[in-house]
Amino acid sequence: MIDQVRYLPLLLTMIFLMTSLLLSAEGRESLVREELTQSKTKVSIVTNQGVIGLELWPDMAPKTVSNFVTLSDSGFYNGTYFHRVIPDFMIQGGDPNTKDDDRSNDGMGGPDYRFEDECYLPGTPLTGPIDDDNTANTVWEKVVLPYLQNTTTPDQEIVTIIQECQQLQNWAPFKARNVEYYIEKTGFTGTLAGQTLKAPVLYSFICMANSGKNTNGSQFFIVTKKDGTPWLDGKHTVFGRVTAGMDVVHKIENLPRDSKDNPLTDNQAIVTNIIVDK
């Protein structure tokens, strides 16, 4: 791998540039693809702490919404509880392992299948000039960064470009080369395409929990952080939002919990039923 001590300032600089692209919470609202939220499926999560009303967006995440509705209708979630609650972050539930008294495996369960993420709209292949910061970010994240993380002798021209970015605190030196330059220099052999995020991970949104890319099952979380969680954008499928009962969500996030963020036995938020409007 790359000499972490020698090149850490360069990597940190590029991470800073990537972070600078993030918008405020208000600005990130504009990233929600409104055309994908027009069709709505109404759902009520009934718990012993109160009712949480949701609207799910089947146009945004058809497989995810279908999975959630099917599991809800079958009673899969009945008797589960929100097993991970972190104030000013989120509440997580949907694990069938939480139905019994064994708390050691809470957070590890799900159905006997996994399915893919639905975070992005299909993109077109990236070729030619790097005209904007978003394209630069994609080339960096998908091509250059993995290359730097897996080589002990990085190409000196690439190192120089990153050093120039560090000095200028912008992407200009990186954008002076085209996509093909970085593909050739790094030996990249994958598919490189632009991506359009369907929706960022915002306050009150319900998203799929996972253990990595394309590992969705039944677990989900609801965001309680007012500014949202931009570091999760594109890593967790957004499939709806809370329309009523955020007071219940906040009540659940503040339940007394143990060192693993698991609510104490006498203070659990148990799902008694999930009702899907037909």
Image (cartoon, rainbow, N blue to C red):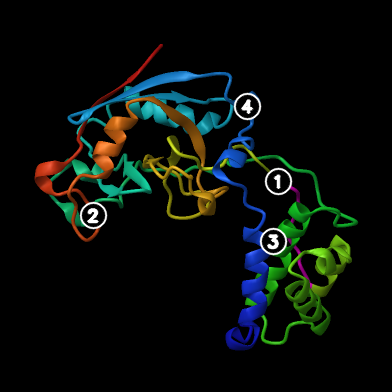
Dot 3 or dot 4, earlier in sequence? 4
Point out the frontmost of discs 2 and 4: 4
Q: Is residue 257 left or right of residue 144?
A: left
What residue type is disc 1 on? Gln
Query: Which of the 4 image quarters holds residue 181?
Result: bottom right
Residue 14 higher or lower than 250, as above or below: below
Dot 2 or dot 3, earlier in sequence? 2
| Mark-to-mark CA distance, 2 and 3 | 34 Å
Residue 192 visible in rendering: no
| Mark-to-mark CA distance, 3 and 4 | 27 Å
Q: Is residue 212 left or right of residue 11?
A: left
What residue type is disc 2 on? Asn
Q: Which residue is mark 1?
A: 195
| Mark-to-mark CA distance, 2 and 1 | 36 Å
Please state the horizontal and vertical placement of residue 151, each as a whole percent of the image: 67, 81
Of the 4 image quadrants, the one containing the N terminus is bottom right
Q: Is residue 274 left or right of residue 48?
A: right
Kindly state the secondary structure of the residue where label 3 is placed.
helix
Q: Which residue is mark 3?
A: 142
**Outermost left residue:** 266
Residue 245 lies within the magenta run: no
Q: Residues within 10 Å of mark 2 (few under 14, many from 20)?
A: few
| Mark-to-mark CA distance, 2 and 4 | 38 Å
Kindly state the secondary structure of the residue where label 1 is placed.
loop
Point out the frontmost of discs 2 and 1: 1
Magenta residue span: 186-195
